[in-house]
Image: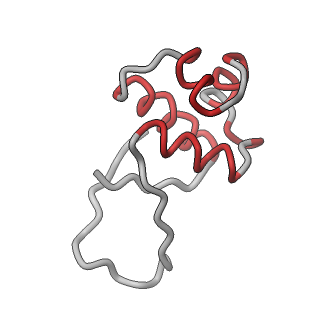
Amino acid sequence: MLHLIATPDQLAQLLAASRHQAGLTQAEAAARVGVSQSRISTLETDASALTLTQLLALCGAYGLQLQLRDRDEPSAEPAPLVEW
C-alpha cells in the first residue's frame, strides 16, 4: 500500500501501525533498531526528531520501503487516499 506522508504526526501514526502489523512490541522493535523502547514510544507519538538512520532502520524492521517522488510528477497509477 502507498502511504503519503506530509507531517511528522502522520509518520508517527504510520510507524505505530506498521510495528503492530509486523507483530512487534516496542521492545522488540527497539532491539532490532538499536534504540531504547522509550525512544520507539516517543517516535510513535512525535516523529519530528526522527533521524534518517532511524527511519531507514525502522522501515527495514517493519517491512517498509522508503520512496520519494516529485509532487508534480504524475505517478503511474493513482495514489489511494489514506486518512490518518
Look at the picture and state if 71 lies above or below 65.
below
What residue is drawn where x is 41% and y is 47%?
64
Q: Is residue 58 left or right of residue 18?
A: right
Q: Is residue 76 left or right of residue 55?
A: left
Which residue is at the front of the view, 20 or 10? 20
Most extreme residue toward the left is 77
What residue is drawn where x is 53% and y is 18%?
28
Which residue is at the front of the view, 6 or 16? 16
Q: Quadrant of residue 6?
A: bottom right
Point out residue 49 in the picture as x, y percentages from the top left corner: 77, 41
Q: Quadrant of residue 40?
A: top right
Point out residue 61 in the picture as x, y percentages from the top left corner: 48, 37
- Quick one: quadrant of the C terminus? top left
Q: Is residue 27 left or right of residue 2?
A: right
Look at the picture and state if 43 lies above or below 23.
below
What residue is drawn where x is 33% and y is 55%?
2
Point out residue 71 in the picture as x, y percentages from the top left corner: 48, 76
Look at the picture and state if 41 lies above or below 14.
above
Which residue is at the front of the view, 16 or 23? 23
Point out residue 15 in the picture as x, y percentages from the top left corner: 51, 35
Most extreme residue toward the right is 49
What residue is drawn where x is 29% and y is 64%?
79
Most extreme residue toward the bottom is 73
